[in-house]
Image (tube, coloured by chain):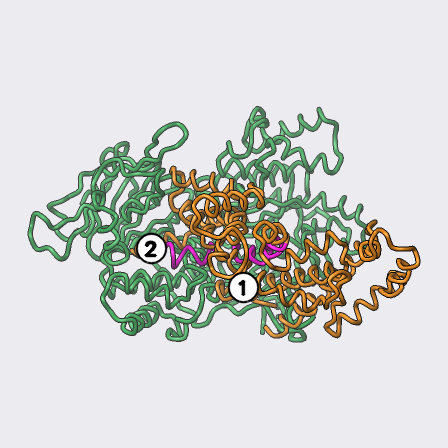
Amino acid sequence: MIAYLGRRVIQSLLILLGVSLITFALLYLLPADPVRQIAGRSATPETVENIRRQLGLDQPFFIQYWHYLTSLLSGDLGRSYIQRSEVTELIVSRLPASLLLMVGAILCELAIGLTMGLLAAVRRGTATDQTLMVASFVGVSAPQFVVGLLLLYVFAVRLGWFPIGGYGTWRHLVLPSLTMGILGAGWYARMMRSSMIDVLRQDYIRTARAKGLARGAIIFRHALPNAILPVIAMIGIDIGIFMGGIVVVESVFGWPGIGQLAWQAIQRVDIPIIMGVTLVSAFAIVLGNLLADTVAPFIDPRIKLR
Amino acid sequence: MSKGGGDKRTGVYAPAVSAAAGAVLEISGLTVSVRGEDGERPVVSDLSLTLARGETLCIAGESGSGKSMTALAIMQLLPWPAARIESGTIRLHDRDRGDMDRRYIDLAALDERRMRRIRGDRIAMIFQEPMTSLNPVLSIGRQLVESIEAHTDLSRAEARRRAIEALKAVRIPEAESRLKQFPHELSGGMRQRVMIAMALALKPDVLIADEPTTALDVTVQGEVLELLRDLQREHGTSIILITHDMGVVAEMADRVVIMRHGRMVEQGTAADIFSRPQADYTRELLAAVPRIGTGVGRQKSAEQKSVEAEMPGSVAVVNDLHVRFDLRGGFFGQVSRRVHAVEGISFSIAPHETLALVGESGCGKSTTAKALAGLVPYHGDIVIGGRNLAGLGRDQRKAVRRDVQMIFQDPYASLDPRMRVGDLVAEPLLIHGIASKEERSQLVAALFERVGLSADQMELYPHEFSGGQRQRICIARALALRPKLIIADESVSALDVSVQARVLDLLKELQREFGIAYLFISHDMGVVENISDRVAVMYLGQIVEMGTRDQVFSNPRHPYTKRLIEAVPVPDPARRRPRFARLDQEIPSPTRKIGEEPPKLALKDVGNGHLVAVS
């Protein structure tokens, strides 16, 4: 177990290194010039060159990357070009909001998706099953900004149950979490349904029935733990999808998380912030996968970590 | 009770209600139908039978005879919504009611809630596949305790105590610590015992065992059958044993019901069925059963023997073959343990000869076959047609391998469902670039005729054939390249006995005609005695005994060989074996730590080339 975790941590560090290199290279090759953004259109060529030298952007690529990497190891993500403050501080101040949103979204998608999938599998072939599957299809295929705006219109503007945007109470959390959760819920519903149908066909379910167990015990004690395994592996991958969605959803709802920070930074070519947010996202994805893999043996004793 | 005479076409007897004062279960006029594409089709038709208290009733028949459907109908576990009970009653004696008129409950008319109380408590069931019949994510203890709790008001601690008792009853050593184990940590035999413990924990009136030993090794089968008999004596449970194996029937049954195509063909006491079968089908079924030591094995003509003597060399020579699989572990995923699947075995096969490799699961017999067919990496020498594969390049090896073809166990899984069977048989020719398109289709047509199919079936797809026909297609495919050696890995194990007998006959005919040598791998000693010239017995990756068929079967010298032959149930109730000796430990694992080499067995000639391991 410890050897396994050790190996996974080393692997994770290598992944993060790779992500940082690729992102850095892509931003370097970007045709937009960050210095122009900082200096403004009316700046003289000398000013531009001065700023460029100040930021070290006149150095060759690998020197720039080396500088970035060495300061990264001491926990320094650099200074924002535009906002004139430390990237670390910016991210730390906004991370809790994003994490809260992510937890809300995961809860939403699990609650909605697993319930839908379970119900559809148990009532397989009925109208309930078909309705749920159509619903999940809509969930999977609807773009998040459309879902977000629709939810805002119905529940905030028309019904007034929830605030239109902002951050603070649990009411603020509901609509953005739902918006992010609906996509995943659609996936989970489909996965859970097929996984559950497969499990319900297994010999051990027949054994459980032959023992005279009640329906509830068969479904929740015998079928569910087996059916949920592939779904758990999915949650790890899901965090990556969330990171993409968070940029859109935070903008729609005015949610002060790192998604919004990233959005502003991208518009203004604020390279240190883009790098910082990318690394934090990559870290979240790696951590999510590691967690999912570590949880699996507790559900299925056949899985051994090595 | 009727003795199974009379009209064998209808073969149905009214349940002897008056005589069945001791009957615990009475089925009358049971018809089960399954809804398919072309409407409802009966899979069990008008079946009537009674089960007396404390007796063992065997329902025997080949696949599709409706025997399992009958069992599921009794339990009300028919696959929903495809199958349903169309008519008939299944009456279970109600021990709680003394009142004469209401002494029976009709299970066919019970609702799900009341049926649930019967299942597991009054009627319990065990299934064929012990590997998949237990829930992999719940501990043995949890699964045992929950079935006790479902039907009693016992506290958790008392239920646990009952669970331990049940495990002890099925002779599982260290019962208490087993409760914490998970199914994957137990062998197949142990799992089947857990299933039996679970079924008998509540002392049911009826135990339905659906092919309970079919998936188990023959020595384990002997132990499990013995256990069932002992438990029946102790508890007086009535058993319905469903099986295709007439050996098991002879071993276990008080009475026998023979079924075919959903109908009862014949019923009677075990002695009557075996010594005086009335129905033609029963006679056919009994005739097809391979038996050990009845001399039905083939006799070679003197002429053939002289031909062999003149044959130069062997088709295949295997010398000091090793196959090991690395298991990785530790921080950097280094090799920490090895599975010693095959440990230095040597044998040779002559043209016209059938060498059988026998042994139980995990003994390395299939791995040996795979090495010979070039499907796993190996160490040692494999010489085919006088050429050692080790010294050859890729293309040369491919050419030599043409002479070795394989037929696998599962005729359903070994044919690509999206290809026409004609193309499947032509494929080896195509791969080796032999013959033009027209010649190929002529060759394939001839092969189809040869294996007993017709040439116009070439355009069909695999799912349109029965299991036996599919195995014939596999044989045609193996024959396409005119190989010198065919490896048959459990090739008839999945077939019904009557089909099995015909496929074995075909294999023997082909051998006479083309002089092919067979490496015949099987766990079934009866089949092996029927087809083999020489036999090699494998145990833990090594050969423990090798000799001619007669040497091994009439004069087995190694204790493992003796045990293997003794374990085979004899299809004759008059010759029931004395008690079968149980082994206290399981067969050890071939997995070892690095540097820990297994002891090498030396083979000693005990006369006329009969080799036996000495340790």
Instruction: Decide which of A119, A107 is in the foreground and name it.
Output: A107
Q: Report the residue at 49% width, 62% height from top.
A: A300
Question: Circle 2: is it few (<14), some (14-19), or many (20+) Cα within 10 Å?
Answer: few
Instruction: Decide which of A116, B476 is in the foreground and name it.
Output: A116
User: Same chain for marks 1 and 2?
Assistant: yes
Instruction: Decide which of B312, B476 is in the foreground and name it.
Output: B476
Dot 1 and dot 2 residues touching (CB under 8 Å): no
- Image quarter (top left, top right, bottom left or bottom right) of the N terminus of chain B: top left
Chain bearing tag 2 is A
Q: Amino acid at mark 1?
A: Ile
| Disc 1 secondary structure class | loop
**Chain letter, orange:** A
Whole-percent x, y for residue A180 in the image: 54, 51
**Chain letter, green:** B
Residue A216's disc is: 2
Q: Is residue B352 above or below residue B611?
A: above
| Disc 2 secondary structure class | helix
Count of all numbered marks drawn on residues in the image: 2
Q: Taking the image as drawn, is residue A210 in sight?
A: yes
Whole-percent x, y for residue A225 in the image: 44, 58
Q: Quadrant of residue B278?
A: top left
Magenta stretch containing residue A270, yes or no?
no
Q: Taking the image as drawn, is residue B274 in sight?
A: no
- Residue annotated with mark 1: A303
Q: Amino acid at mark 2?
A: Gly
Q: Which residues are magenta?
A: A217-243
